[in-house]
Amino acid sequence: MENRMHDFFPDRVYRAVVRQSPDWLWILNDAGVPLGVSPAHQTGQTLFAIVHESDLPDVQEAWFALWRERRPFILMFRSVMPDGSLLWLEAKGYPVHSDEDGVHAAISAREITHYKQQEERLTRLAYYDPLTGLPNRRLFQDRFMQAMHIAKRYHHKLGVIYLDLDDFKRINDQYGHSIGDELLNAAASRLSHSVRDPDTVCRMGGDEFVVLVQQFDQPEDVAKIGRRISDALRQPFDIGGNQIRISSSIGAAFYPDDGMDGEALLQCADNAMYASKQLGKNQFRFFANLEGGPL
């Protein structure tokens, strides 16, 4: 069958197909140097030279396994173009046997940048709040589970800070929901700038936010973060030409003292936040000590 197909399509047809194909094709020697390159990839660079540095180890490992062990592979990686732009490629590597020239290897690839961008958009919809860009409840749970695994292994503490904006309904009623949305977005930005690099700020919905606090020694370290958040949110917001002032009620809970899983710890922190609101708003409470004073 293969011979009949070859007779039906002479070599010049195969060459024309390769020249006109939008896919990339490299025929390589054992050093990864191209012996032949399809016109779709005429950048003047070797295969390894165009691979993004973060993806290069995986590509090199797959290539050496192909060359030494004749092991085919399918791999996705980013390619750096001469103008600095990035393309996503899905590559397939396979050995090539030739009666005349012995054994070589080939890698064919197609561009999948559009599909990766779509995948990233879907991921953001699933894991990030569309208004503020902050992680949502689902991503909080994922990060909490990862952080808890590390905390259990190394006997670290975790903290959860739960807060909401005091009297936020009044803002919506007085200025309208579009101003309220801008205020939430601005408040989320201030929150993000009030925490440390290891911490994660999430929007749980409405005007409620959660901070996952890692790498601290004493409860006072978490209280300091709470005070920074409160101070940042009390500064006036200039939204649509309106000077808007708000405050926040904040509660905190700790793993393993107050809860052994994400939902339990969230509930404890939520209860502490509710106690802050009941005791006058613009306050901070630990779940284990609801007699604390204002920030």
Image (spheres, rainbow, N blue to C red):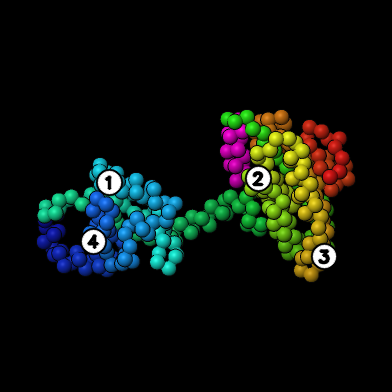
At label 1, which amino acid type do we have? Leu
Q: Amino acid at mark 3?
A: Gln
Mark toward the start of the polypeptide (2 vs 3): 2
Secondary element at tag 4: strand
20 within the magenta span: no
N-terminal label among 3 and 4? 4
Alpha-carbon distance for marks 2 and 1? 42 Å
Asked where in the image residue 223 lies, by quadrant, the reply is top right
- Type of amino acid under label 2: Asp
Residue 82: x, y in percent? 40, 66
Q: Which residues are magenta?
A: 139-152
Residue at 57 percent across and 51 percent down: it is 126
Residue at numbered disc 2: 199
* Disc on the earlier residue, 1 or 3: 1
- The residue lying furthest to the right in this view is 280
Where is residue 269, by image quadrant?
top right
Tell me the crowding category of disc 3: few under 14, some 14 to 19, or many 20 or more residues within 10 angstroms, Cα based.
few
Residue 12 rendering spot, x and y as whole percentages: 16, 67
Q: Which residue is mark 4?
A: 36
Q: Which sits earlier in the primary sequence, circle 4 or circle 1?
A: 4
* Secondary structure, magenta segment, majority class: helix
- Residue 55: x and y in percent read 42, 51
Residue plotted at (28% across, 60% down)? 25
Of badges 1 and 3, the one in the foreground is 1
- Residue matched to label 1: 66
- On the rendered structure, is 178 left or right of 109? right
